[in-house]
Image (cartoon, rainbow, N blue to C red):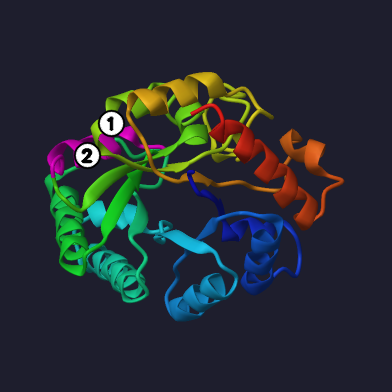
Amino acid sequence: MRNLVINTDLRNSWQGISEDKFIETAAEIGWNGVFSDWTDGKDMKRVRTLTQRNGLYLQSVHAPFTKIAEMWEEGEQGEAELCRQQNCLRACAEIGVPVVVEHAVIGFDKHTPNELGVKRFETLANEAERLGIKIAIENTEGEEYLERLLSCLNGHPAVGFCIDTGHEMCYNESRDLISKYARQLLCTHLNDNMKITGDEITWLDDSHMMPFDGLADWKNIAKRLNAARFQGDLTFELVGKNRPERHTHDIYAALDMNAFLALALEKAKQFRTML
């Protein structure tokens, strides 16, 4: 049976919740695994110890992405960002994490991928291969960058695709990326939203609701995952509170972290039965 995995940074939706406490609670409620994030100086060995102690699987780690656009830019900052991403891979390989999720770019004004960026991501992929792990490039805004990388690195043994179902609905205007990158599909970030809600797409549309609470067609998502022959874990990336001036998460307002995790697990199990 497929593992059901949840993001540890969901804890930031409630005040005063440490990653330790979140991992313990997720295990008690019945999740099979978690995925964490990496920042400079973070003690990833501690994260590994916490997951093992609580009987959880550390499915993946999300690489930092706030400066990922610099991978496509000339100069020292681009080289520094490549170095940072490589450090993330090494930290993850050291504790046995098999997959690192990478954004291709950040910024709604970015539309022109270049050869420099491709070469830097290829360097990153080669480092992942050397370390015995893989990178999964996630769909976000700037779909042109994802397309360029997955085309140029198609067939690379350390490169795959991470489908974010919520991003597909808003950032990618509901284009079917699961089918497009079926052969490269490596992992999931499953979540729901209300699609594009205004004249312009913004990060506010990316609400990361629980499955079945937004406008996603989950039967169709299951159908597409099955057609892609995806057999991996079902990894969910959720947020427990509203984006600024939005009300999508009012339906969760009465839930503390424990209740939210329990309800999300129910919905995750429901989706698993559809595959």
- In terms of sequence position, does the residue under pointer 2 or pointer 1 come before the other? 2
Q: Secondary structure at mark 1?
A: loop
Residue 132, located in which quarter of the rendered image? bottom left
Q: Which residue is mark 1?
A: 181
Expressed as whole percent of the image width and height from the top left, the position of residue 269 reads 62, 38
- The answer to whether mark 2 and mark 1 are in CB contact below 8 A is yes
Give the number of marks. 2
Q: Nearer the viewer, residue 151 or 218?
A: 218
What's under tag 1, amino acid-wise?
Tyr
What's under tag 2, amino acid-wise?
Leu
Membership of 229 in magenta stretch:
no
Q: Residue furthest front?
A: 1
**Residue at image x 66%, y 45%?**
265
Q: Residue furthest right?
A: 254
- Looking at the image, can residue 267 be seen? yes
Crowd band around label 2 with a 10 angstrom C-alpha radius: few (<14), some (14–19), many (20+): many
Say which mark, if any, is on residue 150.
2
Expressed as whole percent of the image width and height from the top left, the position of residue 267 reads 66, 37
Q: Nearer the viewer, residue 210 or 248?
A: 210
**Residue at image x 30%, y 70%?**
93
Q: Secondary structure at mark 2?
A: helix
Crowd band around label 1 with a 10 angstrom C-alpha radius: few (<14), some (14–19), many (20+): some
Expressed as whole percent of the image width and height from the top left, the position of residue 118 reads 16, 48
Left or right of residue 1: residue 175: left
**Magenta-drawn stretch, dominant element (helix, strand or loop):** helix
Q: Which residues are magenta?
A: 140-155
Expressed as whole percent of the image width and height from the top left, the position of residue 28 reads 70, 62
Of badges 2 and 1, the one in the foreground is: 1
